[in-house]
Amino acid sequence: MKIAEIRELSTNELVESVEKEVTNYNQMVLNHSISPLDNPGQIKELRRTIARMKSELRQRELNNK
């Protein structure tokens, strides 16, 4: 997910997306430890997407103060 797409989401949608992506990430890491994924780069990309979402949430939090 691109940063422009993340910024278009409302705060509630963003929180829900982070929770969903973290769950997806944990499942992907578990599956990869059992049997290797076809594209292990997906794990790295998902981790970065989660970081982008959390960064945007933090930025919104600081701007509201």
Image (spheres, grey):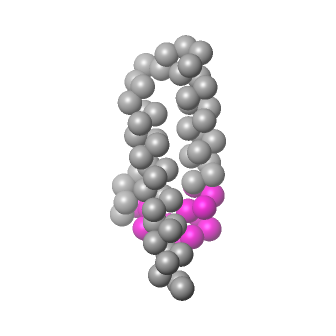
- Residue 61: percent from left, percent from top: 53, 75
Q: Split into 4 quadrants, where in the image is the C terminus? A: bottom right
Q: Nearer the viewer, residue 61 or 11?
A: 61
Quarter-wise, where is residue 8 in the image?
bottom left
- Residue reaching furthest to the top: 35
Q: Residue at x 56, y 19 (%)?
A: 33
- Residue 59: percent from left, percent from top: 46, 72
- Residue 16: percent from left, percent from top: 63, 58
Q: Residue at x 43, y 67 (%)?
A: 7
- Above or below, 28 against 24 in this view is above
- Above or below, 12 against 50 in this view is below
- Above or below, 47 against 62 in this view is above
Examine the structure image and report whether residue 8 is included in the region drawn in magenta: yes
The mark tally for this picture is 0
- Residue 30: percent from left, percent from top: 61, 26
Q: Residue at x 59, y 45 (%)?
A: 22
Magenta: predominant secondary structure element?
helix
Question: Which residues, given as a range, are shown in magenta?
Answer: 5-17
- Residue reaching furthest to the bottom: 65
